[in-house]
Image (tube, grey):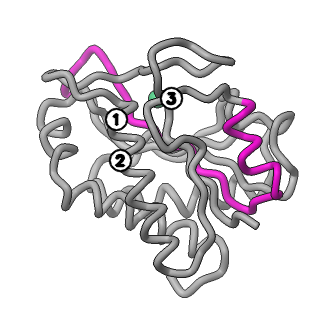
Amino acid sequence: MTTVVLDPGHGGTKKVGGSSPNNATGPTGLLEKTVTLDVARRAAALLTARGVACALTRTSDTNPALAARARTASATASPVFISIHFNGWKVPTTQGTETFWHKNGNERSKRLAGIVQKHLLAATGFKDRSVKQAAFGVLSPNIHDPRTAAVLAEISFLTDPAEEARLKTPAYLDRIADAIADAAQEYLGGAK
Ligand SMILES: [Zn+2]
């Protein structure tokens, strides 16, 4: 059984089943879909090393449909599903960390969102844009098992030049990955 499913947002070159190939792009061209996969791989490696069974919804530059991403978790009623994203905005000074659960989501998702937000804020050091609810398709209760806590993290704004530069450094990527792994473990009742 897969305990934790990590969903690297976006991927590929065309829109598939509600999933766009990319959203945010950094000032020098770093793509959100590249960073989401990098961070997810690092977090999965940490969880695996800590004995937590982990799966990714994609392992290369492909774009699974939103329902296919959810199915990776629902197929084994995984307790944790975390969709990993970076934000973008036309104003390059906009910055902050936020985590979403679905507007019709369950209490498990609400609890996981709070834990993920807490750990990500410590990793990014950015303004708390808070835990929010939205109708994100990849979090829809219609495509998830009710036993799954499903959240989506907008870790930081990639459109901020300083943050784009920081997202190219392995130490920072590892810090974000560690925050995601710690959050999953805290939710699951581990020591962290
Ligand atoms: Zn995104």
Determine the CA span between mark 2 and mark 1. Answer: 6 Å
Residue assigned mark 1: 34
Element carrying mark 2: helix
Answer above or below: position of 7 versus 62.
Answer: below
Q: Residue furthest bottom?
A: 191
The answer to whether marks 2 and 1 mark residues whose Cβ atoms lie closer than 8 Å is yes
Circle 1 Cα neighbour tier, 10 Å, few/some/many (<14 / 14–19 / ≥20): some
Q: Quadrant of residue 63?
A: top right
Q: Could you tell me which residue is drawn at 70 percent across and 27 percent down?
A: 137
Highlighted range, magenta: 67-93
Badge 1 amino acid: Thr
Select label 1 or label 3 by which is in front. Answer: 3
Answer above or below: position of 16 versus 145.
Answer: above
Q: Nearer the viewer, residue 106 or 176?
A: 176
Residue assigned mark 2: 38
Residue assigned mark 3: 62
Lateral position of residue 139 relative to residue 95, left or right: right
Element carrying mark 1: helix
Q: Which mark is residue 144?
A: none
Select label 3 or label 2 by which is in front. Answer: 3
Which quadrant does the N terminus fall into?
bottom right
Lateral position of residue 141 relative to residue 150, left or right: right
